[in-house]
Image (cartoon, rainbow, N blue to C red):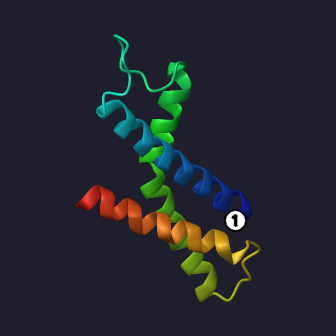
Amino acid sequence: MMRFFTKFAFICNLCFLSCIAMRYWEKSGYIHSDSLEGLGFQPLQSSIIILGYSAVLVNLIFFAVFAWRKLWGKDDPNPIFIFYLNMCSLFFQLYYFLF
């Protein structure tokens, strides 16, 4: 279960980065058509935006579960670099939303 949650948090973090990229791409005026769609496929764009902006909540829950598991002495089956990537993403997301 924890492996799935770690992967889901990582995917949400990737969606957050692509959501930010789409936002700046649309604000820069790079799109020269009448519509301001970043992607040609609207359901994909909507899914990326929903997963991207919910990444902060998913990361906070991930770190709460991770701390709880460490507190009770359970082993973590995930590679440590995914933990560090999620931690860096959480700091970036908190900075992005708060400042």
Label 1: few (<14), some or many (≥20) within 10 Å?
some
Decide: is 71 above or below 30. Answer: below
Q: Residue furthest left?
A: 99
Q: Residue furthest right?
A: 77
Left or right: residue 66 versus residue 16 is right
Quadrant into which the C terminus falls: bottom left
All told, the count of numbered labels is: 1
**Image point (47%, 48%), residue name:** 16
- Residue 22, image x and y in percent? 43, 36
**Image point (41%, 45%), residue name:** 20
Q: SS at mark 1? A: helix
- Residue 15, image x and y in percent? 53, 45
In front of the other: 54 or 24? 24
Judging by the rendered image, the residue that carries numbered circle 1 is 2
Decide: is 68 above or below 96. Answer: below
**Image point (45%, 65%), residue name:** 90
Quadrant into which the N terminus falls: bottom right
**Image point (25%, 61%), residue name:** 98
Left or right: residue 19 versus residue 84 is left
- Residue 42, image x and y in percent? 50, 20
Decide: is 73 above or below 16. Answer: below
- Residue 71, image x and y in percent? 58, 88
In front of the other: 28 or 55? 28
Q: Which amino acid, by three-letter code, is at mark 1? A: Met
In front of the other: 89 or 39? 39
Decide: is 22 above or below 68. Answer: above
In front of the other: 73 or 96? 96
